[in-house]
Amino acid sequence: MKKNISVFFIILSCSINAQNKKGFWGSYKDPSGAVVKINEDKSFVIVGYATVLTGKWHLKGQYIELVPSSPKHAYEVYGRYEPSLNGSKIMFYGFEESKNFFSADAITWSSVFNEDPNCFSFPYVKHFPKTFKTISLCNAELLKQNLSETAANRPGYNDFIIISNYRSRKAKTITYRLINDTLYDLYKDNRLRKTQLSSEDREMFSSIENEARNFYESSEKIYSNKAYNMEIPDIHTQQYMFDQKRNVYVDRINKPDSDNAYYDLSIINEYIKMEINSVTDTISGIEKGSLFHAGCIEN
């Protein structure tokens, strides 16, 4: 009889735990307006003011740990060949939040931004008079380890987009206490209550999750218009044709819109991800000045 009672309580406990685990999937709203979406497949996405985090969650008793995804490398380098371009050009994306250094062909190093930059604009594009065999990059984290990250330009590209992963790699694990349909923030003493997303919000979260999955797992290519808008629709349709001579995708339907350059999707460039290698390197010979100067003009 005691054995039967023990088995009953084990089954009951497992049943309750399964219900609790299944019950917390969904979306939670922070008092600040941020939304935490926890998915059944152990993924999550947090969307707040100027912040998007994605990753995997783990249960530890009454606590749920959200572990943000982290790119393998500090930088991503993408390139293409632009037939009409003399020399090279690079668009630096996401370099505003940390100290970064750049070197072409490992000759000299330059700071990407000036000291204490502020009042940023977009995009930051630098033109160079020649093409490169290698592109090397370093930040404070790599500097402490005497490392840099280098991409070899074997294909002979001359048009690049370099992305800094600083913010993504700095994100830390977030822990909540889970009680019924409420998450408790251990640090801010906030309660995040379960909420129902509108159809528009569900579409937005789905789009964000797909983009994040591509970024962290398989972004072998990225697409951009001439103004570096990288929110590009699917170009592999009958609407776009590939112009081999210009090495671009051309919209068959819509004409160029010079008055709205950022949203003009009539010409799309395809950039190919380049292999990054970590190299033992002591950064020296840093030139004075920087590639860009960002600062507010005081009257």
Image (tube, grey):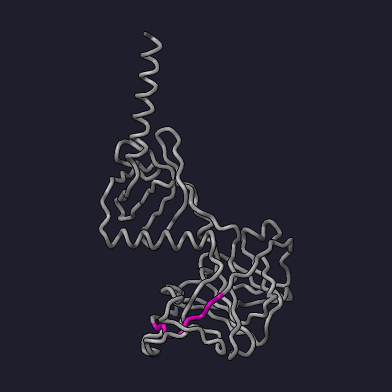
Residue 121 visible within the image: no
The residue nearer to you, when weighing 160 against 218, is 218
Q: Residue furthest front?
A: 238
Name which quarter of the figure residue 25 lies in.
top left
User: x and y percent of residue 68 in the render?
Assistant: 48, 52
Q: Is residue 147 above or below residue 174?
A: below
Which part of the image, by quadrant, shows the C terminus?
A: bottom left
Q: Is residue 117 above or below residue 69?
A: below
The residue nearer to you, when weighing 31 against 222, is 222
User: x and y percent of residue 9 in the render?
Assistant: 36, 19
- Numbered range of the magenta stretch: 264-271
Which part of the image, by quadrant, shows the N terminus?
A: top left
Side (left or right) of 255 relative to 221: left
* Residue plotted at (32% across, 39% down): 23
Name which quarter of the figure residue 73 lies in.
bottom right
Q: Is residue 207 above or below residue 174?
A: below
User: Can residue 265 be found in the magenta stretch?
Assistant: yes
User: Can residue 46 be found in the magenta stretch?
Assistant: no
Give the total number of marks visible in the rendering.
0
User: x and y percent of residue 211 in the render?
Assistant: 45, 63
Side (left or right) of 241 relative to 135: left
User: x and y percent of residue 274 in the render?
Assistant: 63, 70
Q: Is residue 190 above or below residue 255?
A: above
